[in-house]
Image (cartoon, rainbow, N blue to C red):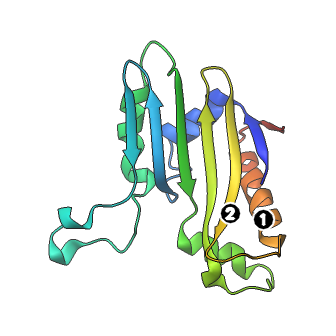
Amino acid sequence: MIILKINAKKCMSELLLKETFDSFSLIEGDITTFNQFHINGYLQRDFFEEDAIPSMQYSAWGDLRELCFSLIKGQRTPLNFKFILALSKEDMLKLYSKDSFTFPFDSIQGLYLNLSYNGDVLQCTTGISFHTFIPDKSLEQHWDNYAKKLLEEHDISFEAL
């Protein structure tokens, strides 16, 4: 796990106006502007027609990006927000396949980016969740490096805290 202080303006442009994070799932989001808005990214399967039930458990960020943008945009910056994004299963498998880990792929529950803004500073905290205890920390190092590389590829400056 690492905590990065991020250039808020550039990151928000990539997050809300571009497809940079669209393949991530939104696990949860909170936005505080004139009201407080909470988004539970868990898909409600009962909402869908039987032949159109998505295979994903959570909404893709790309499906909710415009909604979140509409809540954030305006004359004033939000008082705060927090988004928990999860790497897609396909991208998780690609990352997992790049090395020979000592644990099976299906022991990984998720690889997460927690973006939080307190009205002044935007931070990104990486995180990993496993279904069982895994003492091997090599995936954590790979995930931390992946997150830094993602930010660098999109010219989002950051500093480690």
Q: In the image, residue 42 lies at what x, y percent? A: 38, 58
Q: Secondary structure at mark 2?
A: strand
Residue in the picture at 58% in, 62% down: 87
Q: Nearer the viewer, residue 136 or 48?
A: 136
Label 2: how many Cα within 10 Å (few below 14, some 14–19, many 20+): some
- Quadrant containing the N terminus in the rendered view: bottom right
Going from N to C along the chain, the mark reached first, 2 or 1, is 2
Above or below, 16 against 150 in this view is: above
State the residue at coordinates (36%, 23%): 35
Q: Residue at x 41, y 61 (%)?
A: 58
Q: Say whether residue 37 is left or right of residue 20.
A: left
Is any atom of residue 50 visible in this view? Answer: yes
Disc number at residue 140? 1
User: Which x, y percent locates residue 104?
Assistant: 68, 87
> Residue flagged by tag 1: what amino acid is it?
Glu
What's the mark number on residue 105?
none
Residue 143 found in image quarter: bottom right
- Residue 2 pos. (x, y %): 79, 49
Which quarter of the rendering shows the C terminus? top right
Q: Which residue is mark 2?
A: 128
